[in-house]
């Protein structure tokens, strides 16, 4: 079942980790396409796929990488993972890219353009998938290298409600990234700058402990008047 249309979420590699990721995505009923060389492994699995080299630009284009909101790279060879990450980032500067690593070469994968790098294991495969779809029962999940995913409830009256992600500009202000939004039992992973945050929704936020703490403080700052923010800053000076 070859797939040439663009999809919102792309999984590159269908080895042990890739299979674990796909299992989680299927369980969450997420829309995705898989890229792998081995068509026999992909036949009759019930999902869309593209057969080919996951580090090949044309293959990644066919899989819809250029418009995907999230790209998960789960290739077995680290050099392939680095190149696939580099190509994916070139094709899609705005996507969230999650890459698995076998050896301690995370810095190289980050430089290639990955947002998050995970060490290898079946458990990591499950965690990376849950990171992409924000379907985890716990509020906070520890990931590789101090990265966490946290579910954050946007309560009624929150200053976040009604604002777009572009308007909040969380990446530059606090370093966090919103990777999913859950509302009335429906999870949305097609996240972009025009996405509006609604009251009583749950955000899936990824970042370090410090970045998540800053996000919580940022909401407090938004809820305060300009005058109160100024007073707080003056108080900080005198402490």
Image (cartoon, rainbow, N blue to C red):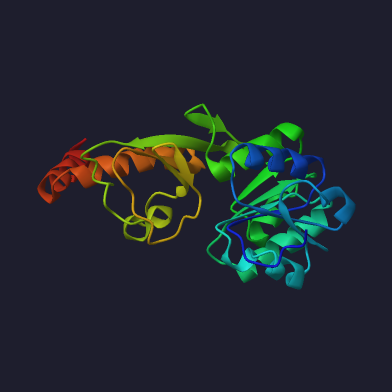
Residue 126 lies in what quarter of the image? top right
- Location of residue 78 in the rendering, given as x and y in whole percent from the top left corner: 80, 53
Which of 104 and 169 lies nearest the eye of the viewer?
169
- Location of residue 221 in the rendering, given as x and y in whole percent from the top left corner: 24, 44
The single residue placed furthest to the top in the displayed view is 138
In the rendered image, the quadrant that contains the C terminus is top left
Residue 131 lies in what quarter of the image? top right
- Residue 170, compared with residue 209, is above or below; it is below
| Horizontal relation, residue 197 to residue 96: left or right | left
The single residue placed furthest to the bottom in the displayed view is 58
Which of 238 and 103 lies nearest the eye of the viewer?
103
| Horizontal relation, residue 166 to residue 68: left or right | left
- Location of residue 181 in the rendering, given as x and y in whole percent from the top left corner: 43, 44
Question: Which residue is found at the position 79% from the left and 51% from the top?
Answer: 75
Q: How many marks?
A: 0
- Residue 202, compared with residue 44, is above or below; it is above
Question: Which residue is found at the position 37% from the left and 61% from the top?
Answer: 194
Which of 236 and 47 lies nearest the eye of the viewer?
47
- Location of residue 1 in the rendering, given as x and y in whole percent from the top left corner: 78, 58
Q: Does residue 18 appear in this view? A: yes
| Horizontal relation, residue 73 to residue 161: left or right | right
Q: Does residue 144 appear in this view? A: no
Question: Which residue is found at the position 31% from the left and 46% from the top?
Answer: 198
């Amino acid at each position: 079942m070859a797939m040439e249309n663009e999809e919102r979420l792309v999984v590159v590699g269908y080895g042990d980790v890739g299979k674990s990721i796909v299992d989680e995505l299927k369980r969450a009923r997420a829309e995705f396409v898989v890229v792998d060389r081995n068509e026999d492994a992909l036949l009759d699995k019930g999902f869309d796929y593209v057969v080919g080299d996951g580090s090949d630009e044309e293959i990644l284009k066919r899989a819809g990488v250029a418009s995907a909101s999230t790209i998960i790279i789960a290739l077995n060879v680290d050099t392939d993972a680095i190149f696939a990450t580099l190509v994916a980032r070139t094709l899609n500067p705005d996507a969230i890219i999650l890459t698995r690593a076998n050896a301690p070469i995370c810095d190289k994968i980050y430089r290639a353009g990955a947002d998050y790098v995970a060490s290898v294991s079946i458990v990591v495969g499950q965690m990376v998938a849950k990171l992409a779809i924000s379907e985890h029962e716990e509020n906070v999940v520890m990931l590789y290298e101090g990265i966490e995913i946290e579910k954050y409830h946007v309560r009624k009256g929150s200053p976040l409600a009604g604002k777009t992600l572009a308007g909040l500009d969380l990446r530059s202000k606090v370093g966090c990234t919103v990777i999913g939004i859950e509302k009335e039992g429906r999870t949305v992973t097609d996240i972009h700058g025009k996405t509006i945050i609604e009251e009583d929704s749950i955000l899936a936020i990824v970042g370090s402990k410090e970045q998540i703490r800053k996000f919580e403080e940022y909401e407090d700052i938004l809820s305060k008047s300009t005058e109160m923010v100024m007073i707080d800053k003056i108080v900080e000076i005198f402490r």
